[in-house]
Image (spheres, coloured by chain):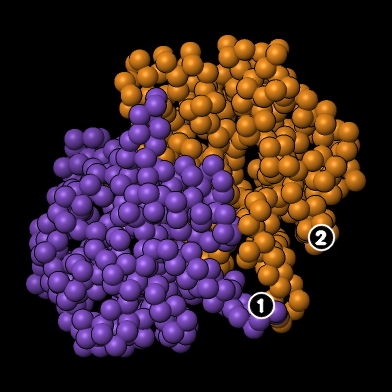
Chain colours: A orange, B purple
């Protein structure tokens, strides 16, 4: 099970961190941007190439201390075909360095449409009768609003190709409660608890030797009370935890996502690591040329911060 | 307002139909497939080129009788960068023929991530200080599970660039009730009615001379009772109605999505039109070479079917 591989790598590195590769042009050092635009002109391909080179530097700097990366597809997709190419190359590069890759794509659709997402990202697509892998993520994130039949095509490819998904349950943003916190009349459960129950059920056939399922849940660091309820409700469900750092989630808050043995979740940090060289706490020590060293330093600081509260 | 343009075109053509451009390789006639793979080899680029040429033939055949097309991004995205390029070229070609384009992307994310989707699909992206349009759809579909702050970045670009969105409210699939039909304790409303209320509120500043808002709702043809409630609840919200044809929705069922004057919704049909030449009812009259003529014939038949029940 892919979840076992993720947990093994977390345990080996004593680091339940995933680095969000969500670049924006204003985060990319000028020397990378200028070279990319010089080669490609002021085109989407120039922006995409700048992102890819930025990511390569980051991955090289963290692959031995961080178990996983989570590229956010929207940042690449906004640059069209060239952006998607950079997203795919980033996935391949991270995998070549031994990292687990979580594609943060939050797709949700039905029937043949969901199958197409699932085949492209987790499975194989048909090319004139041949089968080909296109994106190749280990895990992707999935949106459950359309219901069970929108998730089934992912489960099928998780089984056939040894992949995993993280389903949005309780997200980290301010407006997440608009729908997710509504209480259902019949059973007094919230929507997020109801989705949590679905995720547990979907995951039953995917539980590995770690005791966790390759069908996981996205649970925001910014809502510790809700996360604590979900941790109790979903003992076999691994959590992908956004919201640490820039969004306000603290190690103390998100410790409830972990079991007593320090296993149970992986915590995302995006700009706090990839743009560390621009942050007040690092810019004295690192300049643009040292952006990757700054990211490594920030990743080690995050690891230490998590280990204050989590016995990992 | 873009909604006024869509409604004007629907009225001129007496046809509230949108054709879903959701190609699969097994729908594309062999003469198109073979030529594309001969030029590109058995590669994602071959598949993508086959889709694009298939779409060009379809658009040429229907642009004077159908107001809009709805390309479904997953079918293209599964082929990676080349697929996204074919998606973007399809949008541009349909627009060049005067059609309104609804990008069926069902994106949903937060903050800077949602902004990236919004800038790429509806607005402009930053390329080394210059602003560029990348996808260029007139409308996109949006998933509301993450709440109000996940929708706001789209509203901003709708305002700045004269675009529109359709938010998933009650979808056409069998499992749509898993979450959408749950009844909230406090007010006895279902989730889909609650989302409907949000969509009405988000749309207040986008109401055009037609009386409808550029912030619309996706309401499935397969749930007429729910659609009738939503039509009454959301008088200024235009509906994008999937589920006609292959999914089982009938003209009689979806008539409730329209007002007495025949305005209020646009009905999607994908494979019933684009793969009509393979259907029992058309394959006697059309061969593969006539796939576009078959699509035109099927579009005219659908128009007639809708007009039996809707005074459009």
Compare residues B111 and B271 and report the one nearer the observer. B111
Is residue B34 shown to the viewer in this render? yes
Compare residues A209 and A293 and report the one nearer the observer. A293
- The residue located at (41%, 14%) in the rendering is A35
Subunit under mark 2: A
Quarter of the image with the C terminus of chain A is top right
- The residue located at (86%, 38%) in the rendering is A310
Question: Relative to A75, does residue B224 appear above or below in the rendering?
Answer: below
Compare residues A171 and A211 and report the one nearer the observer. A171
Q: Quadrant of residue B287?
A: bottom left
- Badge 1 local density, few (<14 within 10 Å), some, or many (20+)? many
Q: Which residue is mark 1?
A: B184
Q: Secondary structure at mark 1?
A: loop
Q: Secondary structure at mark 2?
A: helix
Q: Quadrant of residue A4?
A: top right
Quarter of the image with the N terminus of chain A is top right
Q: Which residue is mark 2?
A: A229
Question: Relative to A113, does residue B280 appear above or below in the rendering?
Answer: below
Left or right of A144 in this view: A280: right
Residue B72 rendering spot, x and y as whole percentages: 35, 56
Residue B161 rendering spot, x and y as whole percentages: 34, 49
- The residue located at (67%, 61%) in the rendering is A177
Subunit under mark 1: B
């Amino acid at each position: 099970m892919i979840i076992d591989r993720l947990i093994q790598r977390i345990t080996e590195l004593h680091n339940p961190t995933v680095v969000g590769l969500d670049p924006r042009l204003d985060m990319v050092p000028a020397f990378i941007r200028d070279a990319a635009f010089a080669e490609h002109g002021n085109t989407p391909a120039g922006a995409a190439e700048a992102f890819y080179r930025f990511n390569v530097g980051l991955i090289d700097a963290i692959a031995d201390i961080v178990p996983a990366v989570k590229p956010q597809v929207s940042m690449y997709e906004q640059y069209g075909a060239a952006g998607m190419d950079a997203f795919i190359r980033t996935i391949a590069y991270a995998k070549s360095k031994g990292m687990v890759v979580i594609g943060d794509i939050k797709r949700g659709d039905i029937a043949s449409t969901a199958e197409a997402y699932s085949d492209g990202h987790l499975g194989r697509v048909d090319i004139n009768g041949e089968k080909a892998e296109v994106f190749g993520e280990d895990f992707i994130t999935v949106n459950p609003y359309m219901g069970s039949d929108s998730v089934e095509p992912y489960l099928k490819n998780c089984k056939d190709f040894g992949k995993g998904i993280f389903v949005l349950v309780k997200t980290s943003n301010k407006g997440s409660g608009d729908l997710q916190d509504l209480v259902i009349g019949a059973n007094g459960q919230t929507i997020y608890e109801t989705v949590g129950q679905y995720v547990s059920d979907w995951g039953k056939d995917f539980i590995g030797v770690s005791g966790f399922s390759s069908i996981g849940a996205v649970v925001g660091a910014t809502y510790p009370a809700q996360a604590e309820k979900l941790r109790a409700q979903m003992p076999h469900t691994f959590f992908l935890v956004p919201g640490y750092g820039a969004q306000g989630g603290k190690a103390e808050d998100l410790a409830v996502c972990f079991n007593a043995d320090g296993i149970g979740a992986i915590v995302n940090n995006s700009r706090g690591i990839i743009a560390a060289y621009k942050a007040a706490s690092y810019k004295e020590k690192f300049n643009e040329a040292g952006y990757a060293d700054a990211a490594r330093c920030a990743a080690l600081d995050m690891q230490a911060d998590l280990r204050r509260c989590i016995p990992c």
